[in-house]
Each structure stands twice: as C-alpha cells, then as structure tokens.
C-alpha cells in the first residue's frame, strides 16, 4: 500500500494502476460503514484508491472542522488489511492551492434539507469530489446511503461532468440498536448515545405506518416528530419525506420516497434516512 500526500505523485502513480480503478473518498476516522465501501470497491476493481481528507470547504462557521475526529495511524492500519493500493492523504493546500477560487455546485439539490441547514456545505462536498475525480479518474466511486443527499448530489455531478464515473451507493451500516454508524458518534456521551437511538426509531415508525398503508407524507412527518419529541435530549432540525430524485417534499409518500431527519443530541448534530 502506497501512502501519497502530493497530487502530482497520485497522478503519476495512477498511470501505473491496472484498470478498472475504484475510489472511496473519506474524511477518515474509519468505521465499519467505511470499510463496507472499501470491501465492495476491492471486489469490483483491479485497483483501489482511498482518500482521507477532512475537507475544510464543507464546514461552515462554528462547525466542527477543528475538532472532527482524526486517527490516521489507525486508518492506515485498517486500510492495509483491506488490500488498498493507494491512500491519498493530502493537506488542504494540496487540494486547494494558493489562489484556488473555482467551485462546483449542483444548485437545486444543494439548497434543500442539509443544504438549507448548512449553507455552502454541498458546494464544498461537490468541489472536493470533483478534484478527486480529476486526480484519480476512477471507473467507480463509492458512497454510503447514510449520507443520502450527498450521494444524490455526487451522482448528479457524475452524470453532468464525469460520465465515465459510475457512482455506487451502498446501504447504511447500523449498530445493534439501529443507529447509523458515523464518525461523529464518538462525540456522544453514554447517555447521549442511548438517546441517539431515537433517530432510527422515528424512521422505523414512518416505515411501519407506510407499510400499513399510510400515504400522507405530512402524517408520516408528524409521527416521526412525535417519536423524536419523546426523547428529552433530542432537538429536531428537520424531518422530511421527499422525492429521492429532486429532494422536493412529497404530499403523498409514493414509492420510492426518501425519509430523512436531522437531530441534535446534546452538542452533536446527527442525520439518518431510509428509503421507502
């Protein structure tokens, strides 16, 4: 496994890799959710590139860029065990050289849900992914359903700008109580961790009602909110039942529907979703 810090070196080594080449972009602090993407990418491709980069442009003022969990030594040990060919571990100035002032944005999709709560977030995500696509030129790139809006936006970028890249979205990996695995879960105290299971309970309530025939999206949103409000530590940002292609809120929860939510547990903001 080669650990590469310079974009120029990555581009040079990329020429030597047997194709097809898979790419898994990450921000590190790897967990089983990340590793499920790595294993699928390893199975699907002759070569595999993983990036570890905590991307400053997707964090807003007052967000957790400085404190975002980082553990490069552990990450590299895990990736070597998975048979990764190259780990790209750049600095911020390597991705955004002095004078860098060009950005990628998927306008409509980036303004809803997470985009409404975190202005500029998806512009940062889209820009760094475009940079990685340019450097790695993968045949396939892998993302998790847990960050559903991100995966939808990146699929749109690939369709518009990188038709040679197939975006693969894999299922959310969950803990025993249903909580989606996330690097930010490490912020939670034991009491907060127990409280955080309410996110999946709320999503599961929406799925249960939908399977029983409830078609009103507003009723599903109301029922999810009611579940969340029973948890004293939960502060609701949004609950949504949206079209997974446009992210517009639905009146009738037809199939498919993206049911998602964002909730603060203590100081930690968590997101999760399911597809109906």
Image (cartoon, rainbow, N blue to C red):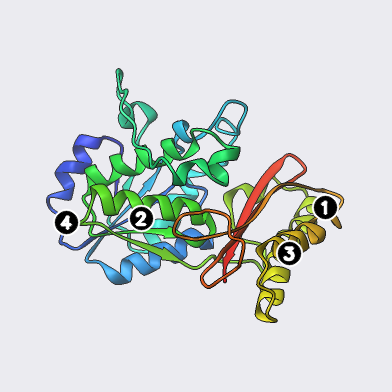
Q: Viewer-nearest of labels 3 and 1?
A: 3
Residue 149 relative to residue 62: left or right? left
Rounded to the nearest angstrom, the CA distance separating label 3 from label 1 is: 30 Å
What percent of the width, then of the height, locates residue 256?
Answer: 51, 70
**Which is more N-terminal, label 3 or label 2?**
2
**Which is more N-terminal, label 1 or label 2?**
2
Where is mark 2, residue-wise?
A: 155
Query: From this viewpoint, is residue 186 visible?
Result: yes
Query: From this viewpoint, is residue 86 visible?
Result: no
Near mark 4 (Cα within 10 A), the count class, few <14, some 14-19 or many ≥20, is some
Residue 34 relative to residue 8: left or right? right
Q: Quadrant of residue 131?
A: top left
**Which is more N-terminal, label 1 or label 3?**
1
Whether label 3 touches label 1, CB < 8 Å:
no
Q: How many marks?
A: 4
Residue 11 relative to residue 140: left or right? left
Rounded to the nearest angstrom, the CA distance separating label 2 from label 1 is: 37 Å
What percent of the width, then of the height, locates residue 265?
Answer: 75, 47
Where is mark 1, residue-wise?
A: 191
In the image shown, does 130 or 112 lie closer to the viewer? 112
Where is mark 3, residue-wise?
A: 219
Q: Residue at x 59, y 54 (%)?
A: 182
Location of residue 144 with respect to 66 vertically, above or below = below
Where is mark 4, residue-wise?
A: 17
Farthest top residue in view? 99
């Amino acid at each position: 496994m080669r650990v590469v810090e310079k974009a120029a070196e990555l581009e040079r080594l990329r020429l030597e890799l047997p194709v097809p080449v898979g790419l898994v972009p990450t921000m590190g602090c790897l967990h089983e959710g990340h590793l499920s993407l790595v294993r699928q990418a390893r199975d699907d491709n002759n070569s595999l590139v993983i990036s570890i980069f905590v991307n400053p442009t997707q964090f807003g003022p007052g967000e957790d860029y400085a404190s975002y969990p980082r553990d490069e030594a552990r990450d590299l040990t895990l990736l070597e065990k998975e048979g990764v060919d190259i780990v790209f571990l750049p600095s911020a100035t390597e991705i955004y050289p002095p004078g860098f002032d060009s950005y990628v944005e998927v306008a409509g999709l980036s303004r809803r849900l997470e985009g409404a709560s975190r202005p500029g977030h998806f512009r940062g995500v889209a820009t760094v992914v475009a940079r990685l696509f340019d450097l790695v030129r993968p045949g396939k790139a892998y993302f998790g359903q847990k960050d559903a809006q991100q995966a939808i936006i990146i699929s749109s970028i690939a369709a518009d700008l990188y038709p040679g890249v197939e975006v693969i979205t894999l299922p959310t990996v969950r803990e025993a109580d249903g909580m989606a695995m996330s690097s930010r879960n490490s912020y939670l105290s034991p009491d907060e961790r127990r409280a955080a299971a309410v996110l999946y309970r709320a999503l599961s309530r929406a799925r249960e009602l939908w399977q029983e025939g409830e078609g009103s999206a507003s009723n599903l949103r109301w029922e999810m909110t009611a579940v969340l409000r029973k948890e004293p530590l939960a502060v609701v940002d949004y609950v949504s039942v949206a079209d997974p292609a446009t992210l517009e809120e639905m009146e009738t929860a037809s199939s498919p529907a993206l049911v998602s939510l964002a909730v603060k547990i203590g100081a930690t903001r968590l997101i999760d979703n399911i597809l109906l």
